[in-house]
Amino acid sequence: MENTSDIIRSGNLFFSIPLYREMVLLDNEGLEVIFNFINPIGVNTYSHKIDGYCIYCQKESTFSVENKQTLSAADWRGVTASSRMAYVELHCSRSECKYYFSFRIGGGKLQKCGQFPSLADIANDKSKVYRRVLSKGDASELHKAIGLAAHGVGIGSFVYLRRVFENLIWRRFEEYKEDNIWSEDDFKKMRMDEKINLLSGYLPKFMVENSKIYSILSDGIHNLSEENCLTMFEPIFRSMIIILDEDKRNKEHEEIKKSAEAALKILLSK
Ligand SMILES: [Zn+2]
């Protein structure tokens, strides 16, 4: 798991850490980073630039950290009961867009208490780009996966990603079972790697080559922690998009081929 300093320096504090997670400031370095970061006025100021998705510009952008208040080191170290609030704005470098955040600090801990736009809004807006290539059913399952991950529900998000994976396998089996005289009972009894092997000629190449994604998703649901699943969400989600996108392209290519063949047949019969 990332430590607090890494979370802050990478910008994940703003773009992926869910609300209310308590982050313990383990050492002086963490304290210093947070002090300079949330309170960038004064000596030893880092020049903070955060990369993230801007929902207003609808593309990746770089944000600068702006904040109006000053807090002393004592505020950070103060006891939790007397914790202070810090308000931070991220300003988009492309336009006038602003993101707003509030943090509770004290007792050697940092907690994000509010943000606008929400993580789910940012994630869903970002996924609009993908949704154009997805079927309604897949888009809705992926939408749920994004929403859950944005609210810190890692295992739940894996359940939806796994459903998208399984749906594609089942769709393909249904489409080709008659041509290949496959038995549904036998298919149901197969392990996922056997199913993928059987259907390999009809599945996206990326899916066949990276079939381990399914074991990671299953492992996440049964054995991994919320934290582990959240850390792995982004790469697994991106892989699922690649799979669905490739599948859609293959289908379109198949249709173009069929209609060309039909036209050719008519032409040659004349
Ligand atoms: Zn912007």
Image (cartoon, grey):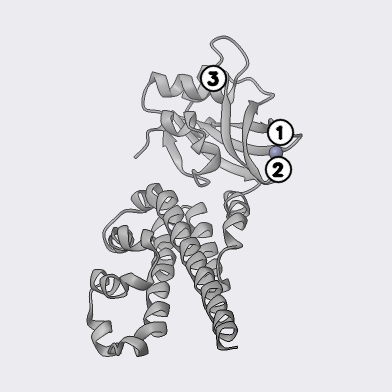
Decide: is 77 above or below 60. Answer: above
* Residue that carries the numbered disc 3 in the rendered image: 36
**Residue found 54% across the figure and 41% down from its top:** 15
SS type, badge 3: helix
Q: CA distance from mark 3 to mark 2?
A: 28 Å
Which image quarter is the N terminus in?
A: top left
Decide: is 96 above or below 197. Answer: above
- In front of the other: label 1 or label 3? 1
**In this picture, residue 17 sits left or right of residue 100:** left
Q: Position of residue 180 (x, y in %)?
A: 31, 86
* Residue that carries the numbered disc 1 in the rendered image: 94
Q: CA distance from mark 1 to mark 2?
A: 7 Å
Is 90 in front, or is 199?
A: 199
Residue 220 in view here: no
Q: Position of residue 45 (x, y in %)?
A: 56, 14
Looking at the rendered structure, the kind of residue marked 3 is: Asn
* Residue that carries the numbered disc 2 in the rendered image: 57
Q: CA distance from mark 1 to mark 3?
A: 24 Å
Count of numbered tags? 3
**In this picture, residue 146 sits left or right of residue 183:** right
SS type, badge 2: loop
**Are dots 1 and 2 in contact, CB under 8 Å?**
yes
For ligand 1, tell me if the residue under mark 1 lies within 8 Å.
yes
Is 72 in front, or is 155?
A: 155
Q: Residue furthest right?
A: 96
